Image: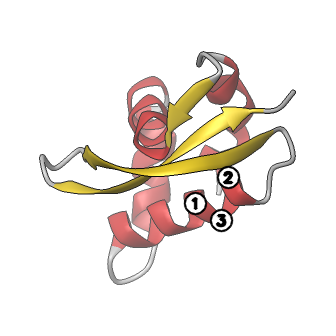
C-alpha cells in the first residue's frame, strides 16, 4: 500500500521513542488521501486490517525496536494496548 511509502518520513519526524498510535495519527494527518485509499483497499475490517499491516511493517524494520506495551487511547477514544518503539539508528 502506498501509505507505507511514508513510514521513513513519519518515523524520522519523531523523537527517539514513539508509539504505534503516534504513527497511525501522523500517517492519517499528513497523508489523508493515501490513508483513506489504504482503508478502502483493506479487508472486511478496514481499520483493524490496515493497522495490523502497519504493525507488521514496523516490526520488520531494523531501525526501530519495540521496547514496551502500554495502555493508550486510540483514534476512536478507546483505551487499548499499544507498542512503544525506540529508534536504534
- Residue 31, compared with residue 41, is above or below; it is above
Residue sitting nearer the eye, 12 or 28: 12
Disc assigned to residue 58: 2
Mark 1 in CB contact with mark 3 (< 8 angstroms): yes
Q: What residue is shown at x 72% (from left), y 41% (from top)?
A: 5
Label 3: element kind: helix
The image position of residue 31, as x and y in percent, is: 49, 31
Give the tally of numbered discs.
Answer: 3
Vertical order, 10 against 34 (above or below): above
Is label 2 in contact with label 1 (beta carbons under 8 Å)?
Answer: yes
Q: CA distance from mark 1 to mark 3?
A: 4 Å
Tell me if 10 is positioned left or right of 48 in this view: right
| Left or right: 13, with 62 as reference point | left
- Near mark 2 (Cα within 10 A), the count class, few <14, some 14-19 or many ≥20, is many
Looking at this view, is 10 or 73 the one in front? 73
Mark sitting on residue 56: 3
Counting from the top left corner in percent of width and height, residue 29 is at 38, 27
- Callouts 3 and 2 close, C-beta under 8 Å: yes
Can you tell which mark lies on residue 47?
none
Q: Nearer the viewer, residue 43 or 77?
A: 77
* Residue reaching furthest to the left: 77
- Find the distance from the CA under tag 2 to the CA under tag 1: 5 Å
| The furthest residue to the bottom | 44
Find residue 22 and report its horizontal and vertical position in percent: 44, 34
Quarter residue 60 falls in: bottom right
Identified at 60% across, 45% down, the residue is: 3
Which residue has dot 1 on it? Answer: 55
Amino acid at each position: 500500500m502506498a501509505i507505507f511509502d511514508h513510514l521513513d518520513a513519519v518515523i524520522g519526524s519523531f523523537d527517539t521513542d514513539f508509539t504505534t498510535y503516534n504513527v497511525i495519527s501522523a500517517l492519517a494527518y499528513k497523508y489523508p488521501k493515501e490513508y483513506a485509499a489504504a482503508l478502502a483497499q483493506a479487508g472486511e475490517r478496514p481499520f483493524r486490517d490496515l493497522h495490523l499491516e502497519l504493525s507488521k511493517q514496523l516490526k520488520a524494520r531494523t531501525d526501530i525496536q519495540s521496547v514496551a506495551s502500554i495502555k493508550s487511547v486510540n483514534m476512536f477514544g478507546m483505551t487499548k494496548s499499544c507498542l512503544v518503539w525506540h529508534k536504534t539508528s
